[in-house]
Image (tube, rainbow, N blue to C red):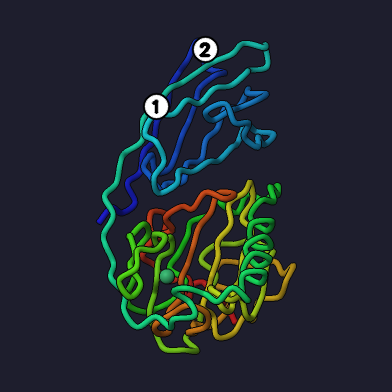
């Protein structure tokens, strides 16, 4: 298993004012936090990144992201810089899951409108690029239980190949408390989505969001400010599941990241004060 591979790259290019610092996981599924104090514009593979006053930016790589990337930026003198870099490839496991209710394996046409609208609402929530910088905080384990599913695994439902799994699954009894693994603000809350059941999305800034699905109960309210260790929801078996578990996701905008790469082993419940 790959866990918390930490890369720290400090490069001096031309002059100290253009020192590039990248922290995080340069790997498929990884989140990377960067800083370029004097940058005016920063691009990843030609795509403009949200840039903070102090030159802060963040990006991430999907499950099947290509391995060669280019970071480029324009500094405050108008000079352009480019820095090509490579990320590490991963191998994913195969998951054969039986006993999924037929209506979820091949959903009836009648629910298509509903699932499309729900997917759109989730997509829109994840597109927001707020100024919050909660993603700089450590990330702790949101719930107790057995890790029953990992990021990236290729899934077969009742023998039919399906989309890969993108979350970290923590299996435990319905009603098990979920604690916020890092600070943020609730930007989406719904007790009943077709596939994901009780669903909660927390914004951590710059396009980084975390998502909690199959919940039996969502206690955090839309718009609520969350601290590390706050009680946010309870584990359930709602939506497309075979048993009660938390499916925990991490996103950079629409790019699905691996929450396990950033998760520390300490439970978030250690920080609760209620
Ligand atoms: Zn899952």
Q: Position of residue 236 (x, y in %)?
A: 49, 84
Asked which quadrant contains residue 64, the reply is: top left
Q: Is residue 15 above or below residue 243?
A: above
Foreground residue, 35 or 87? 87
Q: Is residue 216 above or below residue 86?
A: below
Distance Cα–Cα, label 2 vs label 1: 20 Å
Q: Residues within 10 Å of mark 2 (few under 14, many from 20)?
A: few
Outermost residue, right direction? 223
Tell me the residue at 47%/86% (across/down): 176
Q: Residues within 10 Å of mark 1 (few under 14, many from 20)?
A: few
Q: Position of residue 97 (x, y in %)?
A: 31, 74
Q: Position of residue 268 (x, y in %)?
A: 47, 70
Select label 2 or label 1 by which is in front.
1
Query: In the figure, is residue 49 to the left or right of 178?
Result: right
Foreground residue, 229 or 188? 188
Tell me the residue at 40%/30% (across/down): 9
Which one is earlier in the sequence, the residue at label 2 or at label 1?
A: 2
Q: Under tag 2, what secondary structure? A: strand
Asked which quadrant contains residue 158, the reply is: bottom left
Tell me, for residue 85, which label it has, or none: 1
Q: Is residue 256 above or below residue 74?
A: below
Q: Quadrant of the N terminus?
A: bottom left
Asked which quadrant contains residue 193, the reply is: bottom right
- Label 2, on which residue? 15
Tell me, for residue 253, which label it has, or none: none
Foreground residue, 255 or 53? 255
Which image quarter has ligand 1?
A: bottom left
Tell me the residue at 36%/42% (across/down): 27
Foreground residue, 166 or 211? 166
Q: Is residue 137 above or below residue 108?
A: above
Q: Position of residue 134 (x, y in %)?
A: 60, 54
Task: Count the labels in the image.
Answer: 2
């Amino acid at each position: 298993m790959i866990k918390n591979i930490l890369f720290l790259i400090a490069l001096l290019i031309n002059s100290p004012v253009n020192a590039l610092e990248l922290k995080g996981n340069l790997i498929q599924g990884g989140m990377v936090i960067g800083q370029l104090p004097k940058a005016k514009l920063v691009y990843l593979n030609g795509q403009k990144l949200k840039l903070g006053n102090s030159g802060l930016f963040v990006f991430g790589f999907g499950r099947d992201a290509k391995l060669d990337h280019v970071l480029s930026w324009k500094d405050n003198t108008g000079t352009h810089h480019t820095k090509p870099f490579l990320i590490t490839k991963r191998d994913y496991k195969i998951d054969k899951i039986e006993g999924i209710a037929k209506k979820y394996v091949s959903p009836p046409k009648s629910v298509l409108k509903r699932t499309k609208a729900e997917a759109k609402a989730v997509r829109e929530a994840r597109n927001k690029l707020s100024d919050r910088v909660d993603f700089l905080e450590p990330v702790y384990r949101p719930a107790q239980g057995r890790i029953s599913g990992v990021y990236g695994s290729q899934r077969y439902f009742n023998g039919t190949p399906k989309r890969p799994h993108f979350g970290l699954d923590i299996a435990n009894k319905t009603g098990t408390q979920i604690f916020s693994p890092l600070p943020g603000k609730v930007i989406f809350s719904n007790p009943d989505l077709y596939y994901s059941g009780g669903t909660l999305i927390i914004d951590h800034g710059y396009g980084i969001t975390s998502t909690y699905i199959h919940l039996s109960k969502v206690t955090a309210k839309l718009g609520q400010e969350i601290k590390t260790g706050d009680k946010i929801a309870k584990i359930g078996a709602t939506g497309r599941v075979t048993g009660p578990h938390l499916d925990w996701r991490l996103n950079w905008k629409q790019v699905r990241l691996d929450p396990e790469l950033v998760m520390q082993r300490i439970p978030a419940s250690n920080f609760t004060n209620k």
